[in-house]
Image (cartoon, grey):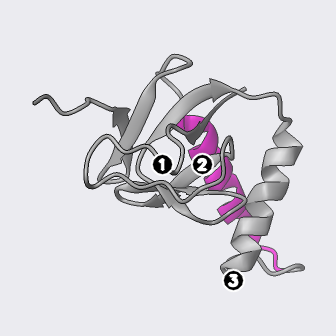
Amino acid sequence: MKLIIPAFDQHYRVSATDYNWTNPNEILTIGTDDAFVGLDSRRYTTRGRVTALDVTRDEVTDKIVSLLTQHGFYVPGRDRQSTETRKRMGEIFGLARGFEVGAVIDLHHGRPRRYAAPTN
């Protein structure tokens, strides 16, 4: 399935405003209007790469529930939490929609766009 992972490692920066504090190959979702957040590390990065990962929908759901639990949005036994989980699932699977595998993307006001490297 097509998902977003960090585009660069912690030692590579395209510009002075780039950062990557995530783990290599972890699944990303929208963290802020201009940065992704890793589902496992809960750390941020400015660039993501579309990749085909061999994970199941249930594995991704477990990661989302873990992330939401850490931030207090998911409390076991609460009924309305499934809405937030479904919203996050749609967000994660929707980020890569419309982009080919290998494309580097960033976020602009919370929306994914193809990354255009700065020209000198």
Provide the residue designation for mark 3: 72
Who is closer to the viewer here, 3 or 7?
A: 7
Provide the residue designation for mark 2: 28
Which residue lies at the image location 25% right of the left edge and 30% below the top edge? 117
Disc 3 is placed on an element classified as loop
x%, y% of residue 82? 76, 63
Q: Amino acid at mark 3?
A: Gly
Disc 2 to disc 1, how far (Cα)? 19 Å
Question: Image height check: is 86 above or below 75?
Answer: above
x%, y% of residue 106? 38, 41
Disc 2 is placed on an element classified as strand
Which residue lies at the image location 88% right of the left edge and 45% below the top edge? 58
Provide the residue designation for mark 1: 11
Which is more N-terminal, label 1 or label 3? 1
Q: Amino acid at mark 2?
A: Leu
Please give the range of residues in magenta: 78-95
Who is closer to the viewer here, 108 or 78?
A: 108
x%, y% of residue 116? 26, 29
Q: Amino acid at mark 1?
A: His
